[in-house]
Image (cartoon, rainbow, N blue to C red):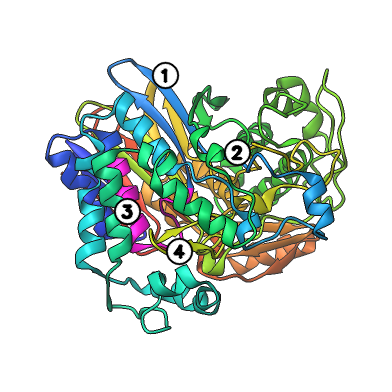
Amino acid sequence: MPEKFSTFAKNGMVVSSQPLATLAGVRVLMEGGNAIDAAVATAAVLGVVEPGSLGIGGDAFALFYSAKERALKALDASGRSPYAANLDFCRKNGFKGMPQRGIHSVTVPGAVHGWSILLSACGAMPLGKVLQAAIEYSEEGFPVAELTAQSWQESEASLQDDEGAAINYLVNGRAPKAGEIFKNPRMAKTLRRIADEGADVFYKGDIAEKIVRCSDKQGGLFALKDFTDHRSDWVEAVTANYRGYDIYELPPATHGFVTLEMLKIVEGFDVKAMGAQSADALHLMIEAKKLAFADRDRYLADRDYMKVSVKDLFSPERVKTLLTRIRMDRVVDELETLPPSRTPSVSPPRRGRTKEGARGADTEYVAATDSEGNLVSFIQSNFMGFGSGVVEPETGIILQNRGHLFSLDENHPNCVGPHKRCVHTLMPGLIMKDGKPFAALGLKGGHVQPQVQVQIITNLIDFGMTVQEAIAAPRFNHMESVKAGLEPAIPESTVEELKRRGHQIVSGAAESFGGAHAIMIHPESGAFIGGSDPRKGGCALGF
């Protein structure tokens, strides 16, 4: 993908990390489907051709602008912990923290139910039609892409340790190589069942029964009730205005509000005068990130258990106070959270950062739009590469490991408990301008997602970049304390100045800076303008 030139189209567009998946979505548009149909079709194919990152064993979230209703909708299609999960169980089993892998890191997969809800409420095609490309790639095979092959190889040892993973995702005991044709007949059969019988076969039929049996075999806590009681939720998006643009994110348990809090802090400075990738601009955003993440780590949880309102965290009064914590001449290392007004304080911030999977093989993002003016921002994930590492053998379903992000601190609202959502990193974004859709954007990358969203948004709004330039521009990735990664294209003079201010600069692989995609709508002509991250192997495609 060129680093400068965007993709233009008039009738519809899809952008994702895999050309095969992008093309599947565009074909759905050309056959009469709308943006929702295209997004689901693209995500379904991504789950086949990039199985380490996402699939039907993971969660999904969507922001959708409906042109017909002139309204923005938000869907939380994340799953919950088993009813039997509780802190006492974890303590009795000697957990020092929530397991990173294995059956006790698994939560109920929400993606399939989310697909069904989205298509029923907003789609133009039935689920069976939308899943056809994914079924075909599973049955007939697909050539494995280079980055996918690399991350697959890095997960080879863990896949060998699980019976279901080995028989479904290894070829004679090894990971497939780049260019090799990979078939997944059991996944094809599973997708065909879902296409023919709907989401109920996943949550109320024998697919759920097989997952529960797999859980029982590995000492897990799942029961059929965990699946039959699962639901997706239409929710109210959280929003903040940044220099005349309304930025929308999903509410908790996702950390989308972190982007909004960062932007409101950044808005207090003349970033345009600082210049793109300048020491001042990067320093400001890194320090804003530290403040917003301190709030995330202290307060974020299942929204039914939150003890604060996220709107209070970036209210005008509180932002004024946060601005006083920014020192432009040096880093501020130890940051204590500032309790929002009229809300109680809870436990101290947890230090550290969200862990990532191999080469960031954890998530993929899709944006789609159509000739009617609908715009979809969609994200789906297994969490870490190949999720929990547990694969139900008969169905080929890779079970996500989102439960790893629960806390074992009984005083924290994110403490593990029965039928509860854990903290989530998935956060599709959508931008409106003067009541009209302006852009859909998002990326993979766990803790880097809000950081990169802020960088892309400021690139578009403050620095006037094209959508492709905004995505391709060099990035920072603040990790913890004074440690921050910078991409090599950041000028050396900027690097030296950041070091002088106290930042510890480290390097990182390309994917540690996320893989972003976006579609922008031209404010005058209405043309669709797509951008795809050169750090990935995907593309924007329209017609």
Q: Which mark is residue 254?
A: 2
Residue 444 visible (yes or no): no
Q: Which mark is residue 434?
A: 1
Secondary structure category for the residue under label 1: loop
Residue at x 52%, y 64% (from the top left corner):
385
Q: Which mark is residue 52?
A: 4
Q: Which residues are magenta?
A: 38-58
- Residues 171 and 353: in front is 171
- Left or right, residue 16 beside residue 501: left
Q: Which mark is residue 330?
A: none
Secondary structure category for the residue under label 3: helix
Q: Select label 1 or label 2 by which is in front.
A: 2
Q: In the rendered structure, which amino acid carries the disc numbered 2?
A: Thr
Q: Which mark is residue 190?
A: 3
| Tags 1 and 3 touching, CB below 8 Å | no
Q: Is residue 440 above or below residue 488?
A: above
- Residues 298 and 41: in front is 41
- Residues 168 and 348: in front is 168
Q: Earlier in the sequence, mark 1 or mark 4?
A: 4
Q: Quadrant of the C terminus?
A: top left
Residue 501: percent from the left, percent from the top?
A: 79, 58
